[in-house]
Image (cartoon, coloured by chain):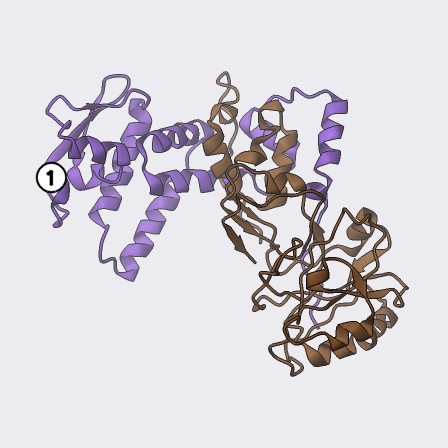
Chain colours: A brown, B purple
Amino acid sequence: MDLDEPQMAISAAAGDGDRLSKLSDVVIGHILSFLPAKEAARAAVLSSRWRHTLAAVHTVSLVEPDGPVFDYEELGRYSPGWYAVKQADPTGLELDLRLRRDPLCHRPYSLRRAGESEYEYHAEKDVGYQETDEEEAQEASPKRARSMSTTRSEYNDEEAYLYASVTREDRSPSPLHRSFSPRGSDDDEEDFLSSDEKFTRRYTYNQATAVQTVPSGIFSCAALRSLSLGSCRRPSACRTSKVLNLRL
Amino acid sequence: MAAATDDAGDSNEMIRVVSSDGEHFEMPEAAANLSLVLRHMIEDDCADAAGIPLAVVAAKPLAKIVDYCTKHAAKSSGLTIEEAEELKRFDAEFIEVDTDMLYDLLVAADFMGVEGLSKLAVQRTADLIKGKTPEQNRETFGIVNDFTPEEEEEICKENEWAFQITKPPSRLC
């Protein structure tokens, strides 16, 4: 979503210098709240005045416009060997964040490791991130409808994932079902579909999204009032007590 | 405590305000009510013929703010679609200002508690920042980079996620 470049040539008034940096934290936080989270965080590098301005932000949205499809190469560089295979549908389900507590929302996603489909695990809500057998996951009571599939991670336990999950409410295969294949790797996509077929049958995959790591800094934003997450991995030791409004 | 309860909205009374550099402005009470600070002053009967002094707002931005409030107050309720669009156009034109004025408006709107204007100015600033590299932003706003290259690299590393580039979907199937 590209906004037009402002037509006027804008430059800081000569002599007056940097007036923007003299604004109060509240106003700067307000400004950054109007930016996508990444751009807001990038402001930290501007100067020492901006180093910690992210903490003044009151609204953070990690939801990418038009659905988060990631540049798989970039993502791969960031967490080698991983890529996301499915993509969000904007009309998605109600979602939950899994921050080692009762899920608040359900959102399907899947992450898989390039070329290794056998590393398929299911995490169950009440056992945190303990990995269980597929059978166990299948037998889980309907109330624990939040099984999800994820590939095994090389990350430490402490770097737990923020899982988005699949609801069980609608068992019919959804016409909205979409799948994504990274460039040219059709084999992988087929692998994915077959290994996750049961999920497709049992749950509606309205969407699946790429995965993004949330910086822990966001969770310590003092002024944070609203946090919108797409599909995110939670960094270690984050606290969200101040977040009043979680939106997905 | 008298005036603010008028629900008619079009009170004829004019409110005087004085800028930091001593210039006097007048606006309808309905317009002044858009500013939280002015509204409270009016409610507390502090609006007299001498005018309400606004210590941090200079004449130039104050003229714009009076302009903004007057326009918005005149069309506050029961907008038709055309009127709403006209107001939108007005806003868009109104905020086409240089960074200096933008800064003045940010400070003044924040100080006076004019929510709509504050949002407008903040949105405009965000639009200026959006989609630019840090270097470009420094240039636009005259921000001096006071980091050493090492520090800068460290911050980039810390915020690595923010420098990841995402692309729009190449295809949906």
Q: Name the chain letter of the residue that bears numbered label 1.
A: B
Query: Left or right: where does residue B151 sit relative to residue B122?
Result: right
Q: Nearer the viewer, residue A189 or A225?
A: A225
The residue sitting at 56% across, 69% down in the picture is: A91
* The quarter of the displayed image where residue B134 is located: top right
List x then y, in percent, for residue A159: 76, 47
Query: Left or right: where does residue B8 sit relative to residue A111?
Result: left
- Reading the image, the residue beneath label 1 is B3
The residue sitting at 47% across, 38% down in the picture is: A30
Residue A8 appears in view: no
Label 1 crowd (10 A; few <14 / some 14-19 / many >=20): some
List x then y, in percent, for residue B172: 69, 69
Query: Left or right: where does residue B69 sit relative to residue A140?
Result: left
User: Tag 1: residue type?
Assistant: Ala
List x then y, in percent, for residue A99: 65, 53
Q: Nearer the viewer, residue B128 or A220?
A: A220
List x then y, in percent, for residue A41: 62, 38
Position of the C terminus of chain B, as image quadrant, is: bottom right
Residue A225 appears in view: yes
Q: In the image, is residue A49 above or below residue B80? A: above
Secondary structure beneath dot 1 equals helix
